[in-house]
Image (cartoon, grey):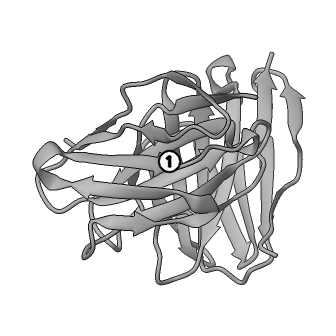
């Protein structure tokens, strides 16, 4: 069965910290995504990666960076966490013929204090 | 600019009743449309998608959606709802088959009464 695993379900960090959110997929998918989900705003794309070391900015990349050193792993990095980055973060993947997200992880609820 | 509107924030139906969730879009060309479902505490799951061809699309879990260009709509339907269908449903719009940028609606939360 398809599996996208996010390393933490809940995470609490402090303002100014560097935060790493990890995502691993076991389907050999080329495409991976990071979204944030906020009440009333829906899902917004932060970054998209279509291959190892390849990335594209989404709608809201400011304050974030990503790393894709291996095909199965896609990391989201908050360079200097701020309170407005408190949110639910969702990772997703899809196979090459489909550039739209198909399989999502269960999410990481991140709180920045 | 493209946009997706889900007019209903919350819908409650009885188990066994039929369901229709509304989705309207705004886009100047041929849209690529998707429905996702998010169960409580989980990520999203793709229910179905429309790229072209037959305007009635079948998905997983017994759902279907109908694309109506004249009404700029892509409504999701199910003939008989089960308690396990209680979740939040998201309609989304892409600008092309190769586009990774999807515009999501704000979601409709479905509650099911036994």
Q: Nearer the viewer, residue A47 or A2?
A: A2
Quadrant containing the C terminus of chain B is top right
User: Does the rendering let one see residue B51?
Assistant: yes
Point out residue A68 in the picture as x, y percentages from the top left corner: 68, 69
Q: Is residue A77 left or right of residue B104?
A: right
> Looking at this rendering, what residue extends furthest in the front direction?
B16
Q: Quadrant of the N terminus of chain B?
A: top left
Instruction: Tell me the residue at 53%/24% (across/down).
Output: B11
Other-residue count near label 1 (Cα within 10 Å), few / some / many at <14 / 14–19 / ≥20:
many
Q: State whether residue A91 is above or below residue B12.
A: below
- Residue B102, given in percent of the width and then of the height, sits at 40, 53
Q: Residue at x 78, y 59 (%)?
A: A23
Q: Is residue A68 above or below residue B45?
A: below
x, y percent for residue B59: 52, 65
Residue at mark 1 = A45
Say if A50 sits above or below B90 in the image.
below
Residue at image coords 44%, 38%: B21
x, y percent for residue B98: 35, 73
Q: Chain of mark 1?
A: A
Tell which of B103 and A12 is nearer to you: B103
Residue A25 placement: quadrant: bottom right
Q: SS for tag 1?
A: strand
Q: Is residue A97 left or right of residue B71?
A: right
| Whether residue A61 is visible | no
Q: Nearer the viewer, residue A99 or B63?
A: B63
């Amino acid at each position: 069965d398809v599996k996208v695993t996010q390393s933490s379900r809940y995470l609490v960090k402090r303002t100014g910290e560097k935060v790493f959110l990890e995502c691993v997929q076991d389907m050999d998918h080329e495409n991976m995504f990071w979204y944030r989900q906020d009440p009333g705003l829906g899902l917004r794309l932060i970054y998209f990666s279509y291959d190892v070391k390849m990335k594209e900015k989404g709608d809201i990349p400011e304050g974030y960076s990503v790393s894709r050193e291996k095909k199965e792993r896609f990391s989201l990095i908050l360079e200097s966490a701020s309170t407005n980055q408190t949110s639910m973060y969702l990772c997703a993947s899809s196979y090459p013929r489909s550039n739209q997200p198909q399989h999502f992880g269960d999410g990481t609820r991140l709180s920045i204090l | 600019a493209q946009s997706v509107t889900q007019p209903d924030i919350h819908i409650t139906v009885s188990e066994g009743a039929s369901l229709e969730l509304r989705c309207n879009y705004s886009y100047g060309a041929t849209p690529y449309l998707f429905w996702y479902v998010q169960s409580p505490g989980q990520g999203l799951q793709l229910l179905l998608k429309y790229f072209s061809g037959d305007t009635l699309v079948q998905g997983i879990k017994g759902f279907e959606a109908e694309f109506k260009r004249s009404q700029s709509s892509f409504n999701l339907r199910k003939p008989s709802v089960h308690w396990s269908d209680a979740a939040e449903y998201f309609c989304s719009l892409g600008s092309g088959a190769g586009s990774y940028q999807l515009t999501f609606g704000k979601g409709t939360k479905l509650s099911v009464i036994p």
